Protein backbone atom coordinates (compact mmCIF):
# COMPACT_ATOMS: atom_id res chain seq x y z
CA UNK A 1 0.00 0.00 0.00
CA UNK A 2 1.41 3.34 -1.03
CA UNK A 3 1.85 6.03 1.57
CA UNK A 4 1.74 8.88 -0.96
CA UNK A 5 1.58 9.65 -4.64
CA UNK A 6 3.88 11.95 -6.60
CA UNK A 7 2.43 15.41 -6.91
CA UNK A 8 4.94 17.49 -8.86
CA UNK A 9 8.65 17.56 -9.69
CA UNK A 10 10.13 20.96 -8.81
CA UNK A 11 13.35 22.41 -10.22
CA UNK A 12 15.14 25.12 -8.26
CA UNK A 13 16.56 27.78 -10.56
CA UNK A 14 17.46 31.46 -10.76
CA UNK A 15 14.67 32.40 -13.22
CA UNK A 16 11.53 30.21 -13.00
CA UNK A 17 9.75 31.93 -15.91
CA UNK A 18 12.66 31.45 -18.30
CA UNK A 19 13.20 27.80 -17.37
CA UNK A 20 9.47 27.06 -17.62
CA UNK A 21 9.53 28.62 -21.09
CA UNK A 22 12.45 26.39 -22.10
CA UNK A 23 10.66 23.21 -20.98
CA UNK A 24 7.35 24.38 -22.51
CA UNK A 25 9.14 24.71 -25.86
CA UNK A 26 10.64 21.22 -25.42
CA UNK A 27 7.62 19.36 -23.97
CA UNK A 28 4.58 21.47 -24.84
CA UNK A 29 2.02 22.42 -22.22
CA UNK A 30 0.77 25.54 -20.51
CA UNK A 31 2.77 27.78 -18.19
CA UNK A 32 1.10 29.20 -15.08
CA UNK A 33 3.15 32.02 -13.55
CA UNK A 34 2.78 32.60 -9.81
CA UNK A 35 5.86 34.78 -9.31
CA UNK A 36 8.63 32.82 -7.66
CA UNK A 37 6.75 29.57 -8.39
CA UNK A 38 5.91 28.71 -12.01
CA UNK A 39 4.14 25.55 -13.16
CA UNK A 40 4.15 23.83 -16.52
CA UNK A 41 1.03 21.70 -17.04
CA UNK A 42 2.07 19.02 -19.53
CA UNK A 43 -0.22 17.48 -22.17
CA UNK A 44 -0.18 14.08 -20.40
CA UNK A 45 -1.49 15.57 -17.14
CA UNK A 46 1.82 15.80 -15.28
CA UNK A 47 3.11 19.05 -13.81
CA UNK A 48 6.69 20.27 -13.77
CA UNK A 49 7.30 23.24 -11.47
CA UNK A 50 10.08 25.80 -11.19
CA UNK A 51 10.97 27.61 -7.98
CA UNK A 52 13.17 30.69 -7.54
CA UNK A 53 16.26 29.77 -5.55
CA UNK A 54 18.48 32.68 -4.50
CA UNK A 55 22.11 31.62 -4.61
CA UNK A 56 21.34 28.69 -6.92
CA UNK A 57 24.47 26.73 -7.90
CA UNK A 58 23.88 24.40 -10.85
CA UNK A 59 25.01 20.80 -10.65
CA UNK A 60 28.10 19.79 -12.59
CA UNK A 61 27.91 16.61 -14.63
CA UNK A 62 29.75 14.36 -14.13
CA UNK A 63 31.28 15.47 -10.85
CA UNK A 64 31.29 13.93 -7.37
CA UNK A 65 31.64 17.32 -5.65
CA UNK A 66 28.61 18.96 -7.37
CA UNK A 67 26.39 15.97 -8.01
CA UNK A 68 23.50 16.21 -10.45
CA UNK A 69 21.20 14.78 -7.70
CA UNK A 70 18.55 13.92 -10.27
CA UNK A 71 17.89 14.34 -13.98
CA UNK A 72 15.00 14.16 -16.42
CA UNK A 73 14.81 11.54 -19.17
CA UNK A 74 12.84 12.88 -22.14
CA UNK A 75 11.74 10.32 -24.74
CA UNK A 76 12.08 11.36 -28.39
CA UNK A 77 11.55 9.66 -31.74
CA UNK A 78 14.46 11.35 -33.57
CA UNK A 79 17.57 12.09 -31.48
CA UNK A 80 19.20 14.31 -34.10
CA UNK A 81 16.11 16.48 -34.63
CA UNK A 82 15.45 16.73 -30.87
CA UNK A 83 19.07 17.64 -30.22
CA UNK A 84 18.95 20.43 -32.79
CA UNK A 85 15.76 21.79 -31.21
CA UNK A 86 16.97 21.79 -27.58
CA UNK A 87 20.29 23.39 -28.55
CA UNK A 88 18.41 26.17 -30.38
CA UNK A 89 16.32 26.66 -27.21
CA UNK A 90 19.42 27.16 -25.05
CA UNK A 91 20.43 23.70 -23.85
CA UNK A 92 24.10 22.79 -23.92
CA UNK A 93 25.62 19.36 -24.46
CA UNK A 94 27.25 17.70 -21.45
CA UNK A 95 28.39 14.51 -23.13
CA UNK A 96 29.64 14.52 -26.70
CA UNK A 97 30.94 10.96 -26.46
CA UNK A 98 29.39 7.93 -28.10
CA UNK A 99 26.82 9.22 -30.61
CA UNK A 100 25.64 5.65 -31.31
CA UNK A 101 24.07 5.34 -27.84
CA UNK A 102 20.31 5.56 -27.43
CA UNK A 103 20.59 8.70 -25.25
CA UNK A 104 22.37 12.06 -25.15
CA UNK A 105 23.04 14.26 -22.11
CA UNK A 106 22.45 18.03 -21.93
CA UNK A 107 22.06 20.83 -19.40
CA UNK A 108 19.01 23.08 -19.47
CA UNK A 109 19.60 26.86 -19.38
CA UNK A 110 19.82 26.78 -15.55
CA UNK A 111 22.31 23.89 -15.59
CA UNK A 112 20.09 20.92 -14.67
CA UNK A 113 21.10 17.74 -16.52
CA UNK A 114 18.56 16.01 -18.75
CA UNK A 115 18.76 13.24 -21.32
CA UNK A 116 17.11 12.88 -24.70
CA UNK A 117 16.35 9.17 -25.01
CA UNK A 118 15.43 7.39 -28.24
CA UNK A 119 12.11 5.58 -27.84
Image (spheres, grey):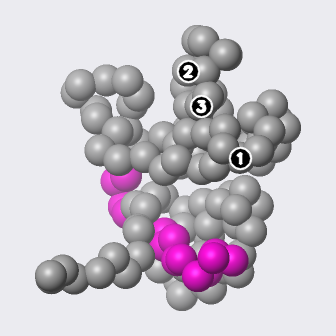
Residue placed under numbered mark 2 in the picture: 95
Q: Position of residue 97 (x, y in %)?
A: 58, 12
Residue placed under numbered mark 3 in the picture: 103
Q: Position of residue 87 (x, y in %)?
A: 75, 37
Numbered disc 1: secondary structure? strand
Q: Are marks 2 and 3 in contact (CB under 8 Å)?
A: no
- In magenta stretch: residue 51: yes
State which quarter of the image contains the N terminus.
bottom left
- In magenta stretch: residue 26: no
Q: Is residue 80 left or right of residue 10?
A: right
Question: Does residue 105 sit above or below 76 in this rendering?
Answer: above
Q: Residue at position x 72%, y 56% from top?
A: 26
Residue placed under numbered mark 1 in the picture: 76
Q: Which residues are magenta?
A: 41-57
Q: Is residue 74 left or right of residue 25?
A: left
Q: Position of residue 22 (x, y in %)?
A: 69, 58
Q: Residue at position x 66%, y 44% from top?
A: 119
Q: Quadrant of residue 21?
A: bottom right
Amino acid sequence: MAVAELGVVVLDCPDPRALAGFYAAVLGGTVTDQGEWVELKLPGGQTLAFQAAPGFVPPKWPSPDRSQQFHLDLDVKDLDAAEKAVLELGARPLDTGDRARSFRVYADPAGHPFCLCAC
